[in-house]
Image (cartoon, rainbow, N blue to C red):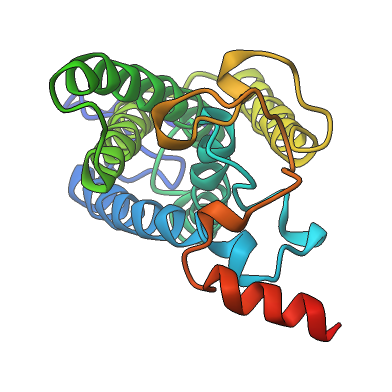
Amino acid sequence: MPAHTGTNSETLAPDGAPISRRLILAWEAGIFLWVTVAASALHYAYELSGFALWITPFAAVNESSIEHLKLFFWPALIAAFVQHAYARQRVNNFWWAKAMAMIALPFFVLLSFYAYVVIVLPIHGKGTLWGAIGTGAIGVLAGNVVAYRIMTAPPLGRAREAIGLALIGLLGVHYVTVTHLTPRHFLYEDFLGYTYSGQFGILEDYTDRLVFVRPEANETLEEAE
């Protein structure tokens, strides 16, 4: 049953009740925390997996901008499915809202990150881990705000929902394939140490960027094999 507007001018959800803005705020706050933490953890998943190919659609394989955006997409998608299961009848325009959030998120991550780089590098010569995390958090928050605004708006129709699902599917295909079919564009280029390295996709050598395995220990394992 489509939502409608009651006599008190409140926007109603598909279940016929007034939309609870407090409920949506609670969901989006939880999603903000989940996506931020999960994306930070996925940054190291490729190394921790032993550089397994199966995890490359979900984890960053280099320091390019797009590989980092991949880290936000999958936690956001998981959160969307969970939220849909529990709250789809309490909000409007669910999949359109989530699609717009997943588009706004990378846009604001890139915008804030490159603004940060332009400001910080001339002053300090390098960025910081917390600065990078902060720019990611700005993007996630922007996505939450976009989702909140659309889910609390009057219904926009089933066509928007179908388009939203299609857009999310296209984003998923992009992130699954981009590591192995990598465009030669600066957004896809490895950016280790805030310097473009000329490398794309899976790298030949990860020795200089190991975090959890010491290079000498890695060499010992290779010799033993």
| Image height of 40 relative to 21, above or below | below
Residue 1 in sight here: no
- Residue 193 relative to residue 32: left or right: right
- Residue 196 relative to residue 149: left or right: right
Q: How many marks?
A: 0
- Residue 81 relative to residue 185: left or right: left
Q: Foreground: 218 or 100?
A: 218
Q: Foreground: 191 or 145?
A: 191
| Image height of 129 relative to 177, above or below | below
State the image coordinates of residue 157 (x, y, percent, origin top left).
57, 20
What residue is rendered at 27% in x and 37% in y? 141
Q: Dividing the image into 4 quarters, which one contains the C terminus?
A: bottom right
Q: Foreground: 56 or 92?
A: 56
Residue 59 in sight here: yes
What residue is rendered at 65% in x and 32% in y? 168
- Residue 146 relative to residue 122: left or right: right
State the image coordinates of residue 223 (x, y, percent, origin top left).
80, 79
Q: Foreground: 104 or 81?
A: 104
State the image coordinates of residue 139 (x, y, percent, origin top left).
33, 32
Q: Dividing the image into 4 quarters, which one contains the N terminus?
A: top right
State the image coordinates of residue 215 (x, y, percent, origin top left).
57, 68
